[in-house]
Image (tube, rainbow, N blue to C red):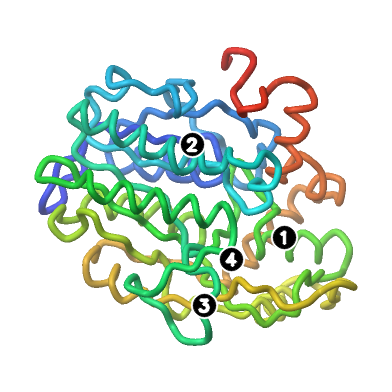
Amino acid sequence: MATVRGQHGNIQKVLLTGHLGYVGTVTAPVLAEAGIQVTGCDINLFDRADFAPGGTVPDIPNLGKDIRDLTVEDLKGFDAVVHLAALSNDPLGQLRPGLTQQINHEGTIHVAKQAKAAGVSRFVFASSCSNYGRAGEGFVDEEGKLNPQTDYGVSKVLAERDLKPLADDNFTPTFLRFATAYGASPRMRFDIVLNNLIAHAYTSGRILMMSDGTPWRPIIHVEDMARAFLATLEADPKAISGEAFNVCRTENNYQIRDLAEIVAKTVPGAHIDYAADAGPDNRSYRVSSAKIEKSIPGFKPKWDAVRGAQQIYDAVKACDLKVEDFEGRKYKRLAQLEALLQENQLDKDFRRTEPIV
């Protein structure tokens, strides 16, 4: 088996938490194709979201444990942890108050401490540009003020804060502040902005705008997210230890209305329509990618919104997506979790009530 041999490292075995989710199902094959032996850790909450046009869910070993229950013994033998597992968007913070912090913040620190004690050398944390929250009109870099507007954003800020002191000569935590994701995946989501706009446009002919379209968002294709993880594993640990990086391209910051215009040009016959209660969104930020370009030169994103919109449109057309699919539990994380709670497949702390099969 080939191994990832960056100038400063030799990463052979990686634990990928959240490997059965939207980003994880794309990331696992990218790491494996680079010669890394990948083991997953996921309780498989979103198995209904299989999406054939996005590819095949990777079949890799799965520890099958809640991240809050991982032990030093579970982590022994790994060279790195890529930590994706989390409650993944803002509305989930309202479903069970406190759980976003318990899982995204405290759970992350638990995994990192177990990894460090087990002799794991690198910990790559999937953070978020939502840390910036309301950032004004200018471009913000990694030294910019953190102003999260949601429980999700707060949880990522606190995780970064508490991971940083763990850095030393033998343990390299790195925080990848990802832009808003988009693109086709084997475990699809239609509750994120560009994917959602395409789904609405295809199924209804309307590009439904839930805000006034003025907020800024950086966006990144899910495949480029996977490339960022790989490039970070290959990077010089001295350049990335305890450091945060905006993961995007500076030119891939868009106002939401600009994305809507791209969708209108992509989906035949679709028109932009504003929801009755559409108004300003206080989450607005544009980010600079200068730091990652300098410190992690192996990161080479390949996608932009125009190409990505076409990919998503081709995918929803290939499976003839229906409104009931993308508006229901199948592709919306909040709806799926609510249903699992009602079916008693999850307890009040979002732990599986039955073993993972």
Q: Which of the labelled discs sits on residue 282, or is there none?
A: none
Q: Amino acid at mark 2?
A: Gly
Q: Residue at x 73, y 28 (%)?
A: 340
Q: Which of the labelled discs sits on residue 308, or is there none?
A: 4
Q: Amino acid at mark 1?
A: Asn
Left or right of 169: which side holds 324? right
Q: Which residue is mark 3?
A: 253
Q: Residue at x 49, y 25 (%)?
A: 66
Whichever of callouts 2 and 1 sits on the residue coming sooner in the sequence is 2
Are the residues at dot 4 and dot 2 in contact (C-beta closer than 8 Å)? no
Closer to us: 41 or 353: 353
Whichever of callouts 3 and 4 sits on the residue coming sooner in the sequence is 3
Q: Which residue is mark 1?
A: 196
Residue 177 falls in image quadrant: bottom left
Mark pair 3, 4: CA separation: 14 Å
Are the residues at dot 2 and dot 1 in contact (C-beta closer than 8 Å)? no
Q: Which residue is mark 2?
A: 18
